[in-house]
Image (cartoon, rainbow, N blue to C red):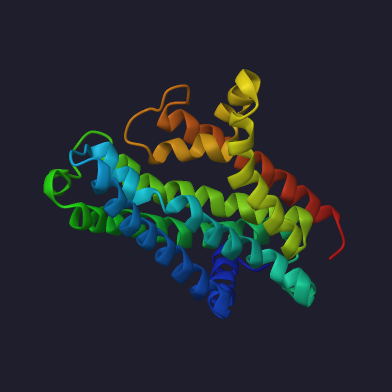
Amino acid sequence: MTSFRDVVASEWTKLWSVRSTAWSLVAAAATVIGVTVLSGRALLGYQPDVSSADVVGVALEGVTFGQLAVCVLAAMAITGEYGTGMIRNTLSTVPARSRLLLAKAAVVAAIALVTGVVGGLGSFLIARLVMGGPASEVSLADPGVWRALTGTGLYLAVLAVFALAVGTILRHSAATLATLIIGVLIMPVVLTQLGAAGKAVSRWWPSHAGFQLLHVDRLPGQLAPWAGFTVFTAATAVLLGLAALLLTRRDA
């Protein structure tokens, strides 16, 4: 039987053999850095004095959009194989389907984790440079700053697994990406417009709850950073379990 380590190595090689992986990471980086520069300059136009929360907020504002690139990368790790029919060869090589899914999850999570941490810290340095003045005095040692910046990697790692699970369940690239766009970007905003009940649901919406880890301070009416991240992680674990169950029971 193929070992888990061998399966991870195979999935790592397979993922980097397609151009979409590199392009997804480039798109994520460009989005985060671009939004950081634009937001930093815009904030200075009307708020000369800034706090650590302002600087980190500017640095990580682009993650809202850049996270879609991570979703694409992770989803395509499974839907791409269904689209080309390669999934049959993969499953014949690795009959233990749950092991295969966990290997894919480990690979996409690792890539997203490193990308998020490097991107978060890099954007923070760029934000300080662009904003200048008081912003340059904000330090990684300030309360909540290090957690928010490195939390970008943790959030994106879980999001990658979340996207992989959705892709495994739906098995179709377009349907998966549409679902992720609606679920990750649109629904949290829509729910906040539906009164008190909608806001209460939004507070516990998995991706929205997990995103609280990227804020320096706890936002009014939202879960605490680590509590929100725990909710997101738990929901992702359940979704991955469902994906594993369906993968083992359905034909390729």
> Which residue is nearer to you in this view: 178 or 210?
178
Placement of 91 over or under 227, stated as above or below: below
Question: Is residue 233 visible from the viewing direction of this image?
Answer: no
Q: Is residue 143 left or right of residue 109?
A: left
For the image, the number of numbered tags is 0
- Position of 170 relative to 234 (above/below): below
Residue drawn at point x = 75 percent, y = 65 percent: 95
Which residue does the image show at 61% across and 19% down from the upper left?
196
Which x, y percent locates residue 198?
A: 64, 25
Q: Is residue 34 visible?
A: yes
User: Along the horizontal axis of the image, is 108 left or right of 175?
Assistant: left
For residue 228, above or below residue 6? above
Q: Residue at 77% of width from left, 72% of height from top?
A: 83
x and y, in percent, of residue 153 in the image: 41, 51
Outermost residue on the right side: it is: 251
Residue 99 is situated, as x and y percent measured from the top left of the image, at 66, 58
Residue 237: image location, x then y, percent:
62, 41
